[in-house]
Image: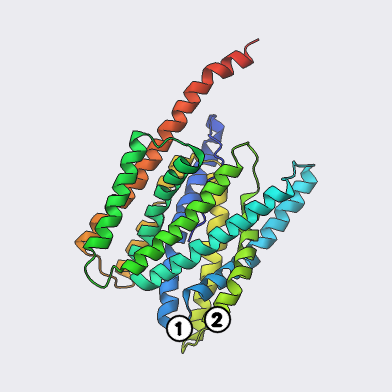
């Protein structure tokens, strides 16, 4: 599952940037699909052992840290060789890492709990559908960002989609507790994004890969006592299968997916990234139906379509807002750069 929070996009304006954009789009597509498999792997772990969602999230954080740390250290060594860089203030860096770490812990743990409770398809769709909505509302309330007509309609559509899922689920496939856990997961995701956006308002940035790695460290420490209470080591008759699944969760939808996401998100527009990341819930739903035998009711399909349409609408509204800001800034730039 992702920590796909906000990022600074660098639009490609020259034709020479086209290969970089194309490569970045491929990175994002692979990351989205990989994230969509995290919940499927979790479902298989839950079926093959008694490992709980907190313990699974703990091992994901530990594995992600172990796999990402060498890349972080290698990048740091290269940046030192390239010359001095502007250091982020220690207090700001501490807030960033602790905030992201706590948000990531809530995000992942609640997501795995939602998958265990209400299934992969519904848990993933609600988490990834509610996240952008909470971000849009939070940005409006906390930072005064305007939603606009398109954004308001998208939020209303997402709420309608959630209502259809909760009220129309009917059978055992959709459980209210699972929906609540998915919304809690989405709140953790939204908190990470809003914190990143708030810290980046003055133009200051940080190495996203490094922040994520150290956030995994925070998550590992924070989850350890709860995971130990839940049971750190799984009781299972299929230890090799469970171990392989745990290694997969740490390697593919965690270390690899985050690395590809950060590489791609640095080049592609944020609105485009939001739409591409819809591959995560779509791929998760396909895996749930085809491989895990989950059943989707008509209400589940309708609620899913409403949520995904709402996220697409939010991305479109974001693109329009960004374009309007660029048009407003263009005359000022002309005046400032004129001889």
Q: Residue at x 58, y 67 (%)?
A: 61
- Report whether 33 appears left or right of 11: left
Q: Residue furthest top?
A: 339
In this picture, is 235 found above or below 23?
below
Nearest the eye: 155 or 254: 155
- The residue depicted at 68 percent of the width and 54 percent of the height is 94
Q: Residues within 10 Å of mark 2 (few under 14, many from 20)?
A: few
First along the sequence among labels 1 and 2: 1
For mark 2, give the secondary structure.
helix
Q: Can you identify the residue that label 1 sits on?
A: 49
Q: Which residue appears farthest toward the bottom when viewing the image? A: 237
- Rendering coords of residue 72 (x, y %): 68, 56
**131 or 209, nearer to the observer:** 131
Please name whichever residue, 289 or 332, is drawn nearer the observer in this view of the structure. Answer: 332
Residue 215: quadrant of the picture: bottom right
Residue 121's disc number: none
Quick one: quadrant of the C terminus?
A: top right
Q: Position of residue 256 (x, y in %)?
A: 55, 60
**115 versus 47 height, above or below:** above
- The local secondary structure at tag 1 comes to loop
Q: Dot 2 corresponds to which residue?
A: 229
Do the CB atoms of the residues marked 1 and 2 lie less than 8 Å apart? no
Is 204 on the left-hand or right-hand side of 148? right
Spatial CA span between label 1 and label 2? 16 Å
Q: Residue at x 30, y 69 (%)?
A: 175
The quadrant holding residue 67 is bottom right
Picture coordinates of residue 120 (x, y %)? 36, 67
Residue 287 visible in rendering: no
Between tags 1 and 2, which lies in front?
2
């Amino acid at each position: 599952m992702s920590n796909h929070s906000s990022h600074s996009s660098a639009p490609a304006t020259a034709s020479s940037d086209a290969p970089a954009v194309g490569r970045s789009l491929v990175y994002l597509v692979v990351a989205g699909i990989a994230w969509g498999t995290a919940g499927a792997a979790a479902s298989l772990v839950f079926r093959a052992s008694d490992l709980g969602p907190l313990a699974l999230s703990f091992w994901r954080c530990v594995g992600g840290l172990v796999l990402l740390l060498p890349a972080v250290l290698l990048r740091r060594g290269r940046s030192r060789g390239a010359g001095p860089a502007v250091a982020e203030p220690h207090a700001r860096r501490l807030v960033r890492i602790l905030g992201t770490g706590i948000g990531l812990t809530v995000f992942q743990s609640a997501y795995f709990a939602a998958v265990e409770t209400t299934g992969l398809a519904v848990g993933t769709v609600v988490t990834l559908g509610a996240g952008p909505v909470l971000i849009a509302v939070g940005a409006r309330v906390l930072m005064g960002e305007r939603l606009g007509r398109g954004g308001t309609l998208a939020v209303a559509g997402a709420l309608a989609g959630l209502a259809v899922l909760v009220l129309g689920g009917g059978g055992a496939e959709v459980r209210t507790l699972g929906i609540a856990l998915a919304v809690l997961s989405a709140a953790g995701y939204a908190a990470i994004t809003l914190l990143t956006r708030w810290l980046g308002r003055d133009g200051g940035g940080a190495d996203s890969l490094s922040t994520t790695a150290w956030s995994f460290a925070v998550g590992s420490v924070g989850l350890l006592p709860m995971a130990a209470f839940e049971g750190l080591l799984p009781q299972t008759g299929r230890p090799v299968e469970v171990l392989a699944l745990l290694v997969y969760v740490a390697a593919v939808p965690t270390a690899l997916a985050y690395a590809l996401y950060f590489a791609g998100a640095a080049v592609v527009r944020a609105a485009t990234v939001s739409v591409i990341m819809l591959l995560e819930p779509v791929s998760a739903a396909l895996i749930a139906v085809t491989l895990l035998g989950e059943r989707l009711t008509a209400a589940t399909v309708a609620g899913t379509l409403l949520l995904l349409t709402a996220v697409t609408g939010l991305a479109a509204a974001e693109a329009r807002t960004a374009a309007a800001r660029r048009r407003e800034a263009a005359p000022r730039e002309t005046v400032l750069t004129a001889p």
